[in-house]
Image: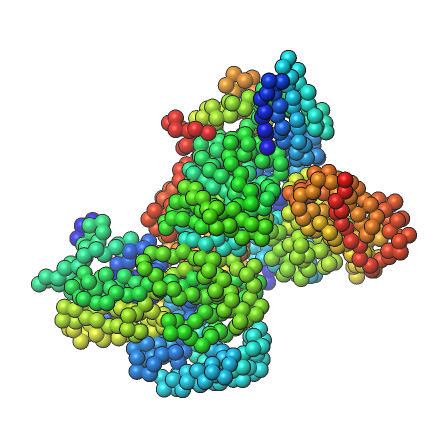
Amino acid sequence: MGERTQYDVVVIGGGVVGTAVLRTLSRYQLKAALLEKEAEVGWGATKANSGIVHAGFHNKPGSWMARLCVAGNRMYDQLCDELDVPFQRNGLMMVARTPEEEQILRRFYQQGLDNGVPGMELLDGDTARRLEPNLSGEITMVLRAASGGIVAPFALAHAQAENAAANGADVYTEVAVTGISCGDDGFTITSQDGGTWKAKYIVNAAGLFADDVARMCGLDVPSLIPRKGEEYILDQRVGDLVKHTIFPVPTPKSKGILVIPTVGGNIMIGPTALEMPRKDDLSTTAAGLDEILAFTQRLVPKIQRRDIIAAFAGLRAGSPTGDFIFETSHSGRAVHLLGIESPGLTASPAIAEHVAEMLAEAGLELMPKPDFNPRRPRVIRFKKLSDEEKEEVIKRDPLYAHVVCRCETVTEGEIVDAVRRGARTVDGVKFLTRAGMGRCQGGFCTPYVVRILARELGVSPLEITKRGRNTELLAAEAKAFLKGGEADA
Amino acid sequence: MAIDTQTDQGFYRRMTCIVCPTGCLLEVRKDADGKLSITGFQCRRGEMYAENEVLNPKRVLTTTVRIRNASLPLLPVRTSDAIPKELLAEAMRVLAQVEVTAPVKTGDAILANLLDTGVDVIASRDMKRIDGAA
Amino acid sequence: MRSIRYTDVAVIGGGPAGLAAALAARRAGAEHVTILERNHELGGILQQCIHNGFGLHRFKEELTGPEYAYRFIPQVEADPNIHVYLNTMVLSLTPTKEITAIHPDHGLVKLKAKAVVLAMGCRERTRGALTIPGTRPAGIYTAGTAQRFVNMEGYMPGKRVVILGSGDIGLIMARRFTLEGAKVEAVVEIMPYPAGLARNIAQCLEDFNIPLYLSSTVTMIHGKDRVEGVTVSQVDDNWCPIAGTERYIPCDTLLLSVGLIPENELSQTAGVPLDPRTGGPVVDEKRETLVSGIFACGNVLHVHDLVDYVSEEAEIAGEEAARHALRETADEAGSGRDGGQQLALKPGSNLRYVLPQRITAGAEVDLYMRVSHPMDAVTLTLSGVTLAKKRQVRPSEMLKIRLKAQHWESLFQAGKAPGQELLVAAEPSA
């Protein structure tokens, strides 16, 4: 790979934070690029995120987490409207079962007031159960925050990258940064396969790997703590078990194990919080599942093991200080975002603005682009259309009459659209369109999705991957094992 | 389970009949003179199967061959009769080299006299011609 | 506003059940029959089942899946009053039998039917429902998805395969992968006996020396990007893995053949009540669901091991749907079934399920049932009345027992009457 264009800013890491920073930068008259090591943006902690837009009562007043969470929460309506990303303010509830826990709720209520969280109330158990009839009868008090919400984190990261690209930013995927050097003409960033990028400023939004990237810039930072979270998804049949996101009182390590409605209509249960020695263990475990079931059944007794249709795990970039860390190097021309764990998703739009301010202070000129378009072309979600709209869409493009994923009613038109918006893998299509996310988990649609991806990308189905490099779905063409004398049936 | 026992008195095998879904448990004894005695079958075809299975086991081969100008890249085929079991792998290698062109009708001969068995390979479905298909 | 089309009998699904139901409905006098099929061709799952063994009961021949389908498809295509809509996906069905479907050329289609036959088939159970611990690498497929890739799409998903579950599709795919030059390392079954037919154990595994590990399961999937291997452990009587029995098997592909589930999302949009034991609708001997005029047959009703029985069941549903449509034509007010004459049928000891779940007093019908575990010899009884004796019964093989006039006589003498419940049981016998 040769040398790329000179950029004003290169963002390293395409999670929800990196893409938010990129989109914010694309508002201004400058050249920005994003480097992502995976095949698509949003593949790290973002994809495994619970998707909760927190209210902001969990964090200590004055902390970055408290300030940016409350500020980020307020930005979500406009952000998701502009980008056409599913978002709902379903509200959240933290529940107490004992007098001691009730005391904790009252403390959080006060902390929320101090943080400026709007729309909170303390409810007794019966009042709460009128709102959420499936809550455990043992629950005696509930802290309800109406401003809490849910969003599709992967879709948000994709949408931010797509919108930034539409406004002139460049997005490079499958670029793993291995070296950063700084000379008179700025930074030179090199990747694993020999590509180089030049930038005057860099933003390190590498998530779990941000400590490694900071060290490439000569910073002596404490190591991030990989903290694994397993999550389990329940069948849509029980999608209306709860409307609010249900929290226990938190533990010192995490917000606890939750019952989480998703914008896709499934209930998710989890996550665990287990500190890991390595940054690559995404396995789910029998112990994790047992723990999650035991905890969540105490919140919502109707949760059943047999309703689980999928499981996954993610790794949080655990902060060694317990707060977001904003480090700089090279006289502020490199900004490092460390320990962006929960409530990082909620805070991400506010983090992006804060990063832009930091870059401006270091000398980056932020001249608004007169033709910046904050909106992204609307995404057609066939299942949600009225009969009239369905008819209209099919008339325009008959591919919308071909249902590829039966469980989630996802059409070929939607999959083609996702590929045109940047999906390149089967998992990318799945997370953008929900094809393969239903109860049959891709049993029917995988062969069709592979075929559509191959056709739209102009490659052989053998090159189609589950999620990038080394995850090809197919080994060989039929009969290949029978040719050249290697068969041994 | 097919279980073979070889003793001084001859040969003994237990096997599951595959002629129909009933799956009878068959027992075949071959005494020192080479005479067979078969038990456990519920029909004449089961008895014949047991005898063939000991003397000359055969199977119908069902597989695919490549096809051009059809909506799919593969055409399902079968042998018109059972072929010796030990020829299955060789037959697969032979058929891996075969490519046909649509249209094809069910029962069309795809390959005559497979490996000199006297058995043909025939198409097991219709496949229409689609111009421009991969 | 789009127009509404009308038909006498609408058949949802053009697989083996739908094909037989449509033909039977026409034979029974339905003037217009409409088949709605989501695929680009008729035949359903049979088109990817290229192995032989179909049709032994019905045609006294061993046909391949496509050949079995072609015993029906030309008849359907030759009948000008069977209207086939291909590439048509049904989105919803109402209790008043109004269907909403989409088609690339016709757009959104509304179809009003006098009777509906549900024939949507089933889907495979997946790993998520099983929650095997480990990572989520590429190379994990259900057996049916792999079958489609190998037999129709023209690609081999992998070269070294372990198969979890000994269902028939998994066994068939063990042979397919082996014939195509891949290596099948093992088939792993959690139960102490195989889930598939005995003949498939013999001709798909034993013929190719593929080991079958019973009372075992996959307890870990290894590999970050692509499957690199699985850990297989033996399980105890409670299906819990036994520590110390782990064995690592290197492989690049894990196939899941752990059962099929009737696909009834659409049935539920019409409010059709399901039987949790079968996963399919509750029906009477006409295969009519509890929603008047909506019938069900094939794997959407209960999972079959033999397509021959699917065709047989579909013919009952098709014929009765036609009768229902004719009655509605004669009497526009519609004549519901006389549910007051029915008895409920429930599975008793050693039976997993029995079908139909409701039965009209005195009706001479075939009962379909599955035992809950293998038994050497059983006596099948209906509320104490002996129906039949069977040997070598296994859950993998559906039993078909004729309920005859003499049985009803005994039942009536014992005081059984409409509105009551009958219990079918499989008692061990010598």
Q: Residue at x 43, y 62 (%)?
A: A230
Q: Nearer the viewer, residue C196 or C235?
A: C235
Q: Residue at x 23, y 75 (%)?
A: A357
- The answer to whether residue B81 shows anywhere in this view is no
- Tell me which colouring the rendered structure shows: rainbow
> What is the x, y in percent for residue A108?
41, 83
Residue farthest to the top, as pictured: B33
The quadrant in which residue A209 appears is bottom left
Q: Residue at x 73, y 46 (%)?
A: C368
Q: Nearer the viewer, residue A206 or A168?
A: A206
Q: Nearer the viewer, residue A338 or A483?
A: A338
- Name the quarter where the C terminus of chain C is drawn: top right
> What is the x, y in percent for residue B8?
60, 18
- The answer to whether residue A214 shows anywhere in this view is yes
Position of A377 relative to A448 (above/below): below
- Name the quarter where the N terminus of chain C is drawn: bottom right
> What is the x, y in percent for residue A133?
58, 75
Position of C87 relative to A43 (above/below): above
> In the picture provided, is C424 more to the left or to the right than A296?
right
> What is the x, y in percent for residue B34?
63, 14
Q: Residue at x 23, y 61 (%)?
A: A212
